[in-house]
């Protein structure tokens, strides 16, 4: 995404130039790249986080698994209903990886 140096509005790509959608100012696309513009492809590649396995990265708590009676589970919260209702708590057993949820009903 490129912004106009003249008025600050978002510019639109047209062939070899960026054209401001408000004031019409034009900038060559090559000049923008030389000024440090990062492409979406490069951003996506740089934002990849690799995991080495092991821990799920989720916090753990004391919770009894209904499948294997293990007393420890990973947990996370997710909004799955309307925004004015509370989030749902999900648990994943640290032993058998059974997943269950807990609602505030």
Image (tube, rainbow, N blue to C red):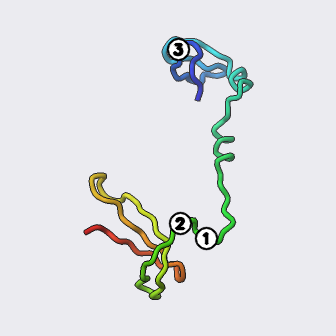
Q: Marks 2 and 3, how far apart in space?
A: 45 Å
Residue receiving disc 2: 58
Q: Residue furthest right?
A: 34
Q: Residue furthest front?
A: 62
Q: Marks 2 and 1, how far apart in space?
A: 8 Å
Which of these two is toward me, 54 or 59?
59
Residue located 64% across and 72% down the image: 54
Q: Position of residue 33 (x, y in %)?
A: 71, 26
Q: Which mark is residue 55?
A: 1
104 left or right of 72?
A: left
Q: What secondary structure is found at the residue carrying circle 2?
A: loop
Which callout, 2 or 3, points at the residue further toward the start of the chain?
3
Which of these two is toward me, 98 or 77?
77
Residue located 47% across and 79% down the image: 98
Residue receiving disc 3: 7
Q: Residue furthest left?
A: 105
Q: Position of residue 56 (x, y in %)?
A: 58, 68
Check the picture and name the quadrant holding the N terminus.
Answer: top right
Neighbor class of circle 1 (other Cα within 10 Å; few <14, some 14-19, many 20+) is few
Neighbor class of circle 2 (other Cα within 10 Å; few <14, some 14-19, many 20+) is few
Q: What secondary structure is found at the residue carrying circle 3?
A: loop
9 left or right of 104?
A: right
73 left or right of 55?
A: left
Q: What secondary structure is found at the residue carrying circle 1?
A: loop
Q: Position of residue 64 (x, y in %)?
A: 42, 82
Cβ–Cβ below 8 Å for labels 2 and 1? yes
Residue located 52% across and 14% down the image: 7
- Up-down relation of residue 8 to residue 39 (above or below): above
Residue located 40% across and 60% down the image: 78
């Amino acid at each position: 995404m490129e912004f106009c140096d003249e008025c600050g509005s978002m510019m639109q790509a047209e062939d070899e130039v960026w054209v401001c959608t408000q004031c019409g100012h034009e900038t060559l696309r090559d000049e923008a790249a030389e000024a440090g513009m990062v492409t979406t492809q490069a951003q996506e590649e740089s934002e990849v986080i690799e995991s080495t396995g092991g821990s799920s990265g989720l916090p753990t708590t004391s919770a009894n698994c209904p499948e294997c009676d293990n007393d420890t589970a990973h947990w996370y919260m997710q909004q799955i209903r309307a925004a004015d209702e509370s989030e749902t708590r999900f648990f994943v057993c640290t032993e058998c990886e059974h997943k269950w949820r807990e609602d505030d009903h």
